[in-house]
Amino acid sequence: MAASTTNILFKPLRLGSLTLQNRIGMSAMTRNRASGTVPNDLMKEYYVQRTAGGTGLIVTEGILVSPQGSQWPTSPGIWNDEQVAAWKTIVDAVHEAGTKIYAQLSHVGRTAHPDAKLQRVWGEPVYGPSAIAARVGGKFRFLPGSPGYVIPTPIPDPRTIIAQFQQAAVTAKRAELHGASGMLIAQFLDSGANQRTDEWGGSAANRARFALETLAALKEVWGPDVAFKISPGNGTNDVGIPVAETIEVYGHLMKEVDKLGLGGGVDGVFFGEAS
């Protein structure tokens, strides 16, 4: 790396209302280390370790906005007071090191399983944009027989899920919306998962509606301090559309996202790496 680039790494960076102490960050990485769905001391140790050397920004693992959106048995959530209190201890410790931290809010949609403990307790079916099961992966090894994906129930009113994201944003200091890796946002964008004929499916504008309305709901809570994670070329969890369609759908999406003014504008280059 050239010396001039190295020098840039250690300069402060404005990100929305925040000023990061440098341009070094840790990208999100799923860990599955919660105590049920509650963050614990092991998770706190993990995040504090990542502040070593003065990291500017940390993006958390996917944080579930409801039990219904769960895929794994040890993923943390943020829908009850116990979870929020546990996250606060982590956030406070990260802030003590001078590092900023964004919560990555997530809902797995059709990649959940109805026999998972949280799904049964919640009493809601596995939801997706349409009644189309993901075809690959999905071996739920914590369930007898390691079953695969099931045909989901179409979400009756997607705005009920948007409300869950918004409530999660209320309980999180700042938020990043997880729209990548075949999660629910990506499922709505994907014609292989979303074949709705209402205002949430069909055209590029309709398929992008769920992502855009969710981002708008988060912005109502935290103004510009909201980020958006996407992966148009990522086929994880059986999403992926032809190149021309990808350009059309994601092109429309990002034009509309740009109008929201998320992040409040970034005044430079940011370097991030998964850990």
Image (cartoon, grey):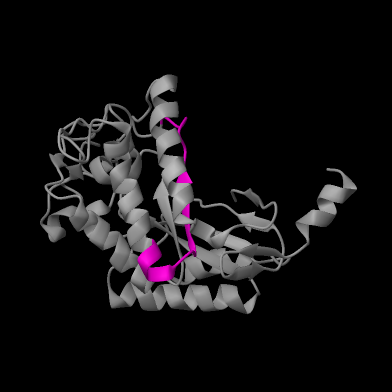
Quick check: 106 left or right of 4?
left
In this view, 114 is above or below 227 = above
Corner quadrant of residue 65: bottom left
- Residue at left offset 36%, top offset 74%: 84
Magenta residues (range): 219-235
In this view, 252 is above or below 25 = above
In this rendered view, identify the residue nearer to me: 34 or 62: 62
**How many discs mark residues in the rendered view?**
0
Q: Position of residue 40 (x, y in %)?
A: 43, 70
In this rendered view, identify the residue nearer to me: 229 or 87: 229
Corner quadrant of residue 16: bottom right
Q: Quadrant of the N terminus?
A: top right
Q: Position of residue 210 (x, y in %)?
A: 29, 47
Quick check: 50 left or right of 217?
right
Q: Position of residue 156 (x, y in %)?
A: 11, 47
Quick check: 53 left or right of 69?
right
- Residue at left offset 28%, top offset 28%: 191
Q: Residue furthest right?
A: 3
- Residue at left offset 73%, top offset 65%: 12
Q: Is residue 56 something one can see in this rendering? A: no
Q: Is residue 266 something one can see in this rendering? A: yes
- Residue at left offset 53%, top offset 78%: 92
